[in-house]
Amino acid sequence: MSDPNSFASLLVSPRADKPRIAGSTWITLFGEGPRQLEALLETSSEFIDRAKLAYGSALLAKPALLKTITGMLRERGIEPYPGGTILEMAIRLGQVPAFYDWAQEMGFTGIEICDGVVEMTREERSGYIRMGVERGLNVTTVVQEAIRKPVIEIVPLNDRIARAKADFEAGATQAHFIYQAMARGETPADVVGPIKFEQVKRVIAEIGSERMVCEALSADDQLKYLRVFGPDISLGHIDPRTVVQLEAQRRRLGYETFWSAVWGRPHWS
């Protein structure tokens, strides 16, 4: 009988080992406990590069439990970081140093800088990035298309590219580009259709693909990005339930990506 592992190796293309920058996968957690997280890590840890504890969920967890969760992630080579809105709350309260103290004490190794709610000058944004870097944290930033303060503001692409470049100069490693959903009424364009792809191509040309992370909330969005930009596009805000599916598509093991590989053009069904 043939070796099942040998057969799988014939079909599964290799991927760069962690730590990865290009082709990284950032998941979003919403309060999962250790048992739920362990089940996810058992099947998916090698495919996950960063994990955000989103929507303030990190603030609701008991400190000992939160330390357990961040420790589990770090042990699997996954960088845990809290959602950027927590820093915005700290800024509003004048408690920025306390935020950095808390993040490090809770076992986070990364932070996210965003300004979706509070006002932030360029100097302030760069200063928050430098504060994180000086503490040994991996700082990434969010470069949004729409900012909700107080009425939705559509940010021109040139401004977003300039913001990302300034973030990198201050010490950020990557910028997460978020394209808002038309269903929420925040932008007249579609989520990841042709208009957005042209914008992504422009950003990649300006800052490099390894420094850009694209939001891909659904498996369909993920597949669209992979079709256009290939398996080494970094994707964020990934639902943990789709991690293995995403990795399979990166390696052209899904029906759609296999079809595309055989016929040399996208499968659009």
Image: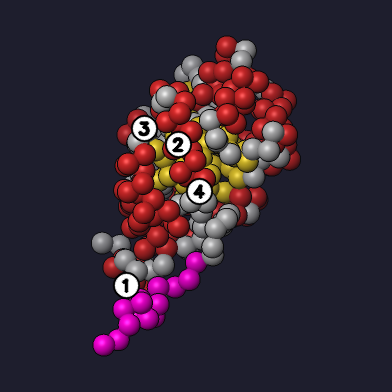
Q: Considering the numbered disc 4 on the image, is that residue within a helix, a strand or a loop?
A: helix
**CB atoms at circles 3 and 1 under 8 Å apart?**
no
Q: Position of residue 134 (x, y in %)?
A: 73, 34
**CB atoms at circles 4 and 2 under 8 Å apart?**
no
Of badges 2 and 1, the one in the foreground is: 2
Does the rendering let one see residue 64? yes
Indicate whether residue 12 is drawn in magenta: yes
Going 50% across and 66% down the picture, which residue do you hit?
15
Residue range highlighted in magenta? 1-15
Q: What amino acid is found at the position of numbered circle 4 in the picture?
A: Glu
Q: Position of residue 163 (x, y in %)?
A: 65, 36
Q: Position of residue 11 (x, y in %)?
A: 37, 77
The residue tagged 3 is 31
- Quadrant containing the C terminus in the rendered view: bottom left
> Which residue is at the front of the view, 42 or 134?
42
Question: Which badge, 2 or 1, comes first in the chain's sequence?
Answer: 2
Going 39% across and 38% down the picture, which residue do you hit?
29
The residue tagged 1 is 259
Question: Which badge, 3 or 1, comes first in the chain's sequence?
Answer: 3
* CA distance for labels 3 and 2: 13 Å
Q: What amino acid is found at the position of numbered circle 3 in the picture?
A: Gly
> Which residue is at the front of the view, 107 or 59?
107
**CB atoms at circles 4 and 1 under 8 Å apart?**
no
Q: Considering the numbered disc 3 on the image, is that residue within a helix, a strand or a loop?
A: loop
The residue tagged 4 is 75
Question: Which badge, 4 or 1, comes first in the chain's sequence?
Answer: 4
